[in-house]
Image (cartoon, coloured by chain):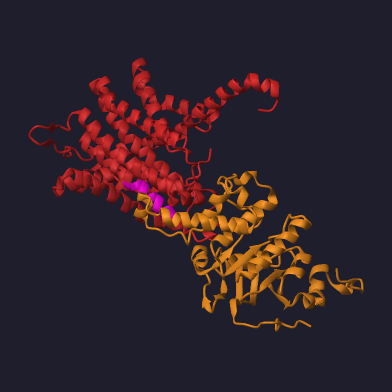
Amino acid sequence: MNAPGEGPILEAPILEARGLTRRFGGLVAVDDFSFTVREGAIHGLIGPNGAGKTTTFNVISGFYAPTAGQVLYRGRDISGRKTSALAAMGLVRTFQGSTLFQEFTVLDNVRVGRHLSAGAGFVSRLLGADRASERAADARARENLAFFGLQDLADEPVSNLPHGHQRMLGMAVALAAEPSVLLLDEPFTGMNPEETRRMMDLVRRIRDRGVTVMLVEHDMQAVMNLCDIITVMNFGALLVEGAPDDVRNDPAVIEAYLGAATDNGAGHAA
Amino acid sequence: MPEPAGAANPENSVWRIAGRLKLVFLFAALAVLPYLLSYSQQEIAVLLVVNVLLVCSYRLMTLTGEWSLGHVVIMGVGAYASALLSKRLGMPVPVSMLAGGIVAAGTSAILSFPLFRMKGFYFLIGSFAAGEIIRLIWKRFTDPFGGPKGLKRIDAFPDIDTGFLSIDFYEPVNYYFLALVVVSASLFVLYRIERSRIGLTFHAIHWQDRLAESVGVDTFRYRTLAFVIASFFAGIAGGLYGHYVGAVNPTRFGVDQMVYVLVWAIVGGTATFHGPILGVVVLTVINEIVLRGLGLDTVRPLIYGAILILSVLYLPDGLESVGPRLRAWVQRRRAGPAAAGGGAA
């Protein structure tokens, strides 16, 4: 029943991996892995621990070059390009945990996020002639904060923020870069159910703004409720791809997560 | 003590005027200063002003989080370039000084390709190795660089003679003012850079280079930019030094000099713009007045080492943290009686 993902691929893929492979010495972390993400989707990438999700993520976002295979973004081969170049093309990632500029204020974090859109020449920065574009960048940064309900905390140092707010700020920084594709690295880790619910709502609203979302996540319930399509990895390769309901009931997925069903003769879905 | 580069200040015009006044007083004091000093102290004051530019340019580099051991050699590149350009090509000294800065900046732009493949400790060692290679080139190629003896009889800064006003830059007082003008202008540029979005981006790279990269900051380019700007001003400092002293040699730009720059920066503190200036001024005063007065200036490295250790142990945020600490202490003392009644203050 290992039906490859012939699911609801409606439009041309915005992001695609073809035969993606990444080796670390003798270890093959990602092995001939292919998937497609269609524009406007919330696409989940799941799999048991050590399946190669994070490595895949790091290859897509340019932290590692693939050993073999390609990553295509809007049909262009982007494998091995610098993360900053990918961000300029509209492919922006977030990080696990509260990876932020902890020493900055909340607003300054988002201002850095607006790096690409707040361009100005060196001399105009020196002379202060960038004031108009900086003011516009500030206004947009405050809008980005307001989207996450963080506008009243703009001048707080990040280190004063509770964990949940820091996670949202991480998304705000990424969204400030105006991505077309947002790659979320475990956005729900360490959140309580209420925070998870709010975060899911925010992810949907980000998608409704026209941003394609791809996320790696451990929280099964969140993934099942949120994603339009789910790709399941195991041992660095594609296991199953499909809609949440198909994936949930797929014996191969259940086996990958819970071990071989034949051992006890009964494999119940979690 | 973070100082977010772009934090919008409230419209506190009183504070702004107070800040301007402080600057006016500072420059007034700097203008009077040389007339209160002896001839030899005036010479030290010239070198101190040059060293202020050296350590401030070094701080700009450290904003991105990378500490280099080649900064003094880069200063030497500026000094050698300016000396050779004026001596061999007959370039006017003010122009050659500027050209020295540009050569220093260009050198670091080339060096950044191998060096910024590394970070942290590896970059530190790499920058040391690069600096030593440059010094070996000076020593080996006697033809333009004069070998181990270096260059002598470097052209002096040309006198200004407009009939009623004539300035002879051989006089330390006059060279002091020249250096003061050049260094003030340079510090202003460095300050503006740090206060702009460029400075914010440097800080961002320091604290989370992966996050900065993920929102489109080309961290390699910005590290290179910081290195090149810092090197340009180090080269200017080198030019000011070379045309004042009249001689440069490879030993003058050796690693022991670099250690002094590090000690100034660390003892002063690098979190604020004025920290390294405090460091170099205080340590120079200690060195030249106290140690020389006590006849201890031959054991300078020993004393500097002790000061470094003491400051790391007891003043880890540098001399720049003394002021805010004192202010907080005074406020606590003042709030003391009131707080005793109220509890939390």
How many numbered circles are shown?
0
Q: Which chain is red?
A: B
Name which residue lies at 67% across and 71% down. A42
Quadrant holding the C terminus of chain B: top right
Work out whether residue A153 or residue A203 is closer to the camera in this orientation and state it. A153
Name which residue lies at 28% across and 47% down. B101
User: In which quarter of the view is residue B72 placed?
Assistant: top left
> Is A57 one of the magenta-colored residues?
no
Please identify which colour was used for chain A in the image. orange
Measured from the top left, where is residue B66 in percent x and y? Answer: 46, 47
Name which residue lies at 37% across and 18% down. B290
Work out whether residue A213 or residue B275 is closer to the camera in this orientation and state it. A213
Q: Main secondary structure of the magenta part?
A: helix
Answer whether residue B68 is visible to the viewer in this image.
no
Work out whether residue B325 or residue B207 is closer to the camera in this orientation and state it. B325
Left or right for A42, reference B124:
right
- Residue range of the region highlighted in magenta in the rendering: B222-232
Asked if A137 appears above or below B144 in the picture, the reply is below
Measured from the top left, where is residue B273 in percent x and y? Answer: 43, 38
Left or right for A86, reference A248:
left
Measured from the top left, where is residue B84 in percent x and y? Answer: 19, 46
